[in-house]
Structure formats: C-alpha cells, structure tokens
Amino acid sequence: MPLFFVSKDAHCDGIRVMLSGQGADELFAGYRRYEFMNSLELGFALKNDLDNIARNNLERDDAATMANSVELRVPYLDRNVVELALRIAPELKIQNGIRKYILRLAATRLFSLNIGCTCPHLRSSHEPTLIPPLSIMRIIA
C-alpha cells in the first residue's frame, strides 16, 4: 500500500516515472534470512528469490503505481545488472554481518566520488538510508 500512496503523491506533483529498488535484496543478499547461510545455500536462495520476484512483488508494485498513472522502473532488474550480480560470489554479498555488502561498497565509492563525502563505515540495513542530493540524482540520470 505505501507504494500506491507514494505514486499518488508523485502523480499529483507531475511525476510520471518512479524508480524502485526491487531486486537489490534478491541480487545482493539483503534479507536477514541470508545471514546464516553458507555460500552454497546463499547462492541457491538468491537464485530462487530472483526467479520468484515477478510473481511476488513486481506485478503488485506495477499495479499500485499504474493505478495512479505512474510508470515504475526497476533498474536493479536490468539484464546487465542481473548478469553482473549473478557473477559476484555469494560470500562477497554478506561480510561481517553486513548484508548487500558489495552493493554498499560500490555505492559508497560512487557517492564519495560524486559529492566528496567519506563514509566511516558501510551502513547496516537497520540505519536510515541517506538520499543523495537532487544534483547527484541528475548526474546519475
């Protein structure tokens, strides 16, 4: 339901396309249940979750946004991103209890290059997510 209301507000603000982070947890081991799996188990679990994402999440999210005439795009599920993520060893996706480790590391380096900030550590998924300034979002787009 939150996506329905966000897309409703977006439509009222004249926004016609939204980006979603769908797929990041399935590709880069973002769910808590992945933490206690060995590398082999993790690889199978990630593949299974990725195979089921359309049935479990994408149809629902697309319906919620399209009900408000807003298109939802899922950049993590771009073919090139998926193929790259599948080539990354599962043990690089969780390090020292930090889920999506390799993705956080890449984002930290990308944003520190673009906005000149440094991050003392990679944030855990339980901490608030920082939204890059609008100027950075324009650079990335």
Image (cartoon, rainbow, N blue to C red):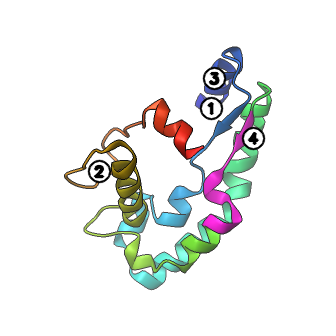
| Helix, strand or loop for disc 4 | helix
Q: Which mark is residue 123?
A: 2
Q: Is residue 21 left or right of residue 95?
A: right
Marks 2 and 1, how far apart at CA: 24 Å
Residue type indicated by callout 3: Phe
Q: Earlier in the sequence, mark 2 or mark 1?
A: 1
Look at 54% across and 73% down and name the residue there. 45
Q: Let me know if residue 74 is in the magenta part.
A: yes
Residue type indicated by callout 1: Leu
Look at 36% across and 67% down and name the residue there. 35
Q: Earlier in the sequence, mark 2 or mark 4?
A: 4
| Residue contact between numbered discs 3 and 1, judged by CB atoms under 8 Å | yes
Q: Is residue 141 left or right of residue 89?
A: right
Which residue is identified by label 4?
A: 62
Q: Earlier in the sequence, mark 4 or mark 1?
A: 1
Q: Which mark is residue 5?
A: 3
| Helix, strand or loop for disc 3 | helix
Q: Which residues are magenta?
A: 71-81
Marks 3 and 2, how far apart at CA: 27 Å
Residue type indicated by callout 2: Arg
Q: Which mark is residue 3?
A: 1
| Residue contact between numbered discs 4 and 1, judged by CB atoms under 8 Å | no
The residue mark sitting in front, 2 or 1, is 2
The residue mark sitting in front, 2 or 4, is 2
Q: Is residue 64 left or right of residue 89?
A: right
Marks 4 and 1, how far apart at CA: 9 Å
Marks 3 and 1, how far apart at CA: 5 Å
| Residue contact between numbered discs 3 and 4, judged by CB atoms under 8 Å | no
Residue type indicated by callout 4: Asp
Q: Position of residue 57 (x, y in %)?
A: 67, 49
Q: Position of residue 111 (x, y in %)?
A: 39, 48
Q: Earlier in the sequence, mark 3 or mark 2?
A: 3
